[in-house]
Image: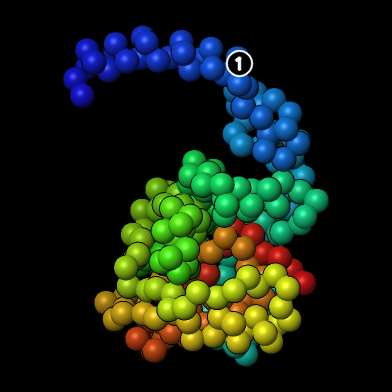
Amino acid sequence: MDRITLSVKKIIFQPLKEVGAIIFPECCLFCKSELTTNEKHVCGLCELELKRTYFEEFKESSALDKLFWGRVKLEKTFALYYFNSETAIREMLHQLKYQHKEKLGIDLGKKIGLTLKQSALFSDLDALIPVPIHHKKEFIRGYNQSELLARGINSELGVSIIKNKTSKRKHTSSQTKKSNQERWENVATVFQSQDLSEYKHVALVDDVITTGSTIESLANELLKSNEHLKISVISLAFAQS
Ligand SMILES: [Zn+2]
């Protein structure tokens, strides 16, 4: 697009955008109060109430590290927030998963990426692998929420995203009403992975980690294709039980 077309577009659309903002002001996705021009997705108050993990500052093992002990060897784990149903993280995850909030996903991914960049926690990372969802589900939903987060992380860290080397084999039923054992059996061996021998250190990207069974199952599958692969986990939220 040339500069003149761009300027004309700007002259026409910018005022429309501003009028739109007056008629349909953007609201906080959690408390619904009107957002100021400096606020994005959530208002300042709801942002303050989010429970940050600060795992990037931990010198000792975190509860998220410990979740995988004795199950699968992970290099590093990170989650930006603790899941808490009383805070905006609940609504963020819901909108990310079911309402195709592309910008929300990418912006949250950027926030994760920025935190990791400042802490230099994942400076030797080769690639990001969004936890795959079944292709039918992705087709119906139109996107994979973990991939949106990965795109945001990628824009801050510059680490590439591997999309087509891992997939989910069968459609698992909803996890919410199952016991831990049932959840594990439900996701065990459902992933498949192609050759990852060219990579040394990858990070699995997920929206929320609860029992850790999805990550355990996927990481074990990746290790089958490359037993020397270092695998880390980056998640938006961690639901500590
Ligand atoms: Zn709010």
The outermost residue toward the left is: 2
Q: Where residue 154 sits in the image (x, y, percent)?
A: 40, 53
The answer as to whether callout 1 falls within 8 Å of ligand 1 is: no
Residue under the point 60% across and 87% down? 185
In the shown orientation, is residue 31 left or right of residue 23? right
Q: Mark 1 points at which residue?
A: 23
Left or right, 220 with respect to 43, comes to left
Q: Where is residue 188 in the image (x, y as percent from the top left)?
A: 54, 85
Q: Which residue is drawn at 43% across and 65% down?
A: 136
- Up the image or down, 30 lies above or below 201; here it is above
Q: Residue at x 77, y 45 (%)?
A: 49
Question: Residue 26 versus residue 56: which sits nearer the camera?
Answer: 26
Q: What amino acid is found at the position of numbered circle 1 in the picture?
A: Ile
Quadrant of the rendering where the N terminus is positioned: top left
Report crowding for label 1: few under 14, some 14 to 19, many 20 or more residues within 10 A (C-alpha). Answer: few
Seen from the viewer's position, the closer of residues 178 and 8 is: 178
Q: Which residue lies furthest to the right in this view?
A: 86
- Dividing the image into 4 quarters, which one contains the C terminus? bottom right
Considering only vertical position in the picture, is 175 above or below 116? below
Q: Position of residue 47 (x, y in %)?
A: 70, 41
In this rendering, would 3 be left or right of 43? left
Image height check: is 225 above or below 55? below
